[in-house]
Amino acid sequence: MTPGRGQTAQVLAGLRGHEAGRQWPLVLERDGEVVGRVNVNDIVGGVFQNGHLGYWIDGALAGRGIMTAAVRATVDLARSDLGLHRLQAATLVHNTASQRVLERAGFEKIGMAPQYLRIAGEWRDHLLFQRILHGRDNRETKDPA
Ligand SMILES: CC(C)(COP(=O)(O)OP(=O)(O)OC[C@H]1O[C@@H](n2cnc3c(N)ncnc32)[C@H](O)[C@@H]1OP(=O)(O)O)[C@@H](O)C(=O)NCCC(=O)NCCS
């Protein structure tokens, strides 16, 4: 499949962000085709050591536990390769599938952010989740069973 101009622009922006150390763009691939994405965006160092997580998967492959596995793998990468302290994710209030993915990958809900992101021209409320990757003692936090 040939990627559209919008997708090409997104990939190029992701690669530029990666080179600058601001972004870690990942793809889910099946038979040579991209069927999903997981991104660690807005990576900040210093006293924050934080990244924002975003993801999607082809609807035909949804509901098979693939994104739960992908987010868990990204948590490992963010902790061990990127050395981050924390990941944050935001979901639309009604996006229960995404909330379930985060809960199963060990994220905790930290609250509701009114008018957090502009989606399709409208500022929408989001639930915020975080996963602490290194505890107060700087040891790695455990994954849920
Ligand atoms: C959200 C999304 C990434 C989930 O991917 P996935 O591969 O289907 O996720 P998994 O199969 O690992 O887990 C989905 C969980 O949500 C549950 N679920 C799926 N649809 C649901 C629904 N409509 N209502 C409630 N729960 C739902 C599944 O049962 C599963 O939980 P379970 O294993 O406890 O039964 C995928 O649906 C998607 O790409 N959506 C569009 C983009 C998006 O919303 N991205 C996230 C932005 S925050």
Image (spheres, grey):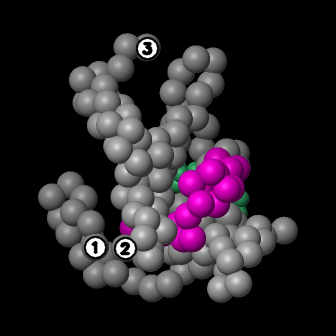
Q: Residue at 38% x, 38% y: name it.
A: 19
Q: Is residue 99 visible?
A: no
Residue 52 drawn at (x, y percent):
44, 62
Q: Is residue 106 visible?
A: yes
In three-dimensional space, the C-alpha distance between marks 3 and 2, rounded to whole angstroms, equals 33 Å
Q: Secondary structure at mark 1?
A: strand
Residue 86 drawn at (x, y percent):
54, 71
- What is the crowding at mark 3: few (fewer than 14 residues within 10 Å), some, or many (at least 20)? few
Q: Residue at 68% x, 77% y: name it.
A: 138
Q: Look at mark 1 in the image and give the residue it sits on.
A: 116
Q: Look at mark 3 in the image and give the residue it sits on.
A: 1
Residue 126 - label: 2
Q: Nearer the viewer, residue 85 or 54?
A: 85
Residue 140 drawn at (x, y percent):
73, 71
Three-letter amino acid code at the position of disc 1: Tyr
Does the magenta run of residues contain 136? no
User: If the image is split into quadrants, where does the N terminus sit?
Assistant: top left
> Taking 141 as reference, is 86 left or right?
left
Asked whether the residues under the numbered discs 3 and 2 touch, taking CB atoms below 8 Å apart as contact, a structural biologist would say no
Is residue 62 placed above or below 134 in the rendered structure? above
User: If the image is split into quadrants, where does the C terminus sit?
Assistant: bottom right
Q: Which residues are magenta?
A: 69-95
